[in-house]
Image (cartoon, rainbow, N blue to C red):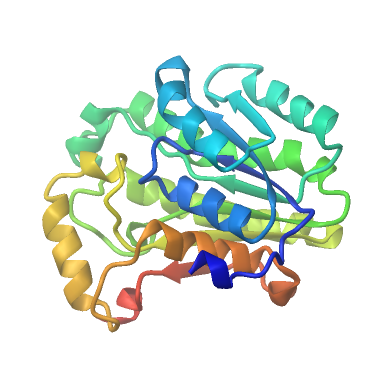
Amino acid sequence: MSETIRPVLAGRRALVVGVANDSSIAYGCAKAFRTAGADLAITWLNEKARRFVEPLADDLGAAIKAPLDVSVPGEMEALFETIRGTWGRLDILVHSIAFAPKEDLTGGLLNCSAEGFAKAMDISCHSFVRMAKLAAPLMTEGGTMFAMSYYGANRVVPNYNVMGPVKAALEASGRYLAHELGPQGIRVHAISPGPLKTRAASGLKDFETLLAEAAEKAPVGELVDIMDVGYTCAYLATPFARRVTGGTVYVDGGANIVA
């Protein structure tokens, strides 16, 4: 499929945050952007993750590779200074990170502690706002920002628990950022993929059942993969989608339309 993709993003610079391995949604985005001709900046969470992520970044020819733990003061600012010094501008931002302490994720919303809720909200939602604030001044020719959501933001999904309210806040943040940044030619999208076999999703109880139900429910009759998500983001980052912003884009084979 990649051989049929034209370099419609040639000359664009894309920062992709959230690659953990080659099954990550963020990796699908990075690969799709690269296939479409974009230059890449890719981050890893910490030194433990680096040995998994750096080879993938090298394979994709990433021009910038750096650590980024959004909970560590100064790391995000250092990353954007590197981007400023290396590229001078940024065109695409992908925020594909989420976290909740296990004990707060598995115990149901009623049992989620205030500290766990705040931690989940900070890393999974507010870090996107902070990232957008740093990215916007570098998007001197306009740009596109993406944050990864899920169907559980709008409907109750068993065992999704605290991440439901957190993802709802993320989608609302995307709408407000789209409103604030629109005059600068910056578009903002919440992307809502169907369930995927990623490392993050494996922490959800009964996830295999969720996968089977999603495939059965989807009008296309099958699950989506990380490249489906990546190519959707690549399209939205092109001028072909220049008047699209602020909404939640479902990449789930149509499962979200079925009751």
Residue 246 visible to the viewer: no
Give the image quarter of residue 73: top right
Q: Nearer the viewer, residue 129 or 97?
A: 97
Query: What percent of the width, then of the height, locates residue 212?
Result: 14, 65
Which residue shows up at 84% across the image and 28% down it? 85
Which residue shows up at 63% across the image and 38% down it? 62
Q: Nearer the viewer, residue 95 or 114?
A: 95
Residue at the far front in the pictured view: 3
Which residue shows up at 20% across the image and 44% down it? 204
Position of 203 compared to 76: left or right? Answer: left
Q: Is residue 73 above or below residue 209?
A: above
Query: What percent of the width, then of the height, locates residue 181?
Result: 77, 55
Residue 99 visible to the viewer: yes
Query: What percent of the width, then of the height, locates residue 249?
Result: 50, 69
Query: What percent of the width, then of the height, locates residue 254?
Result: 35, 78
Give the image quarter of residue 153: bottom left
Position of 248 compared to 152: left or right? Answer: right
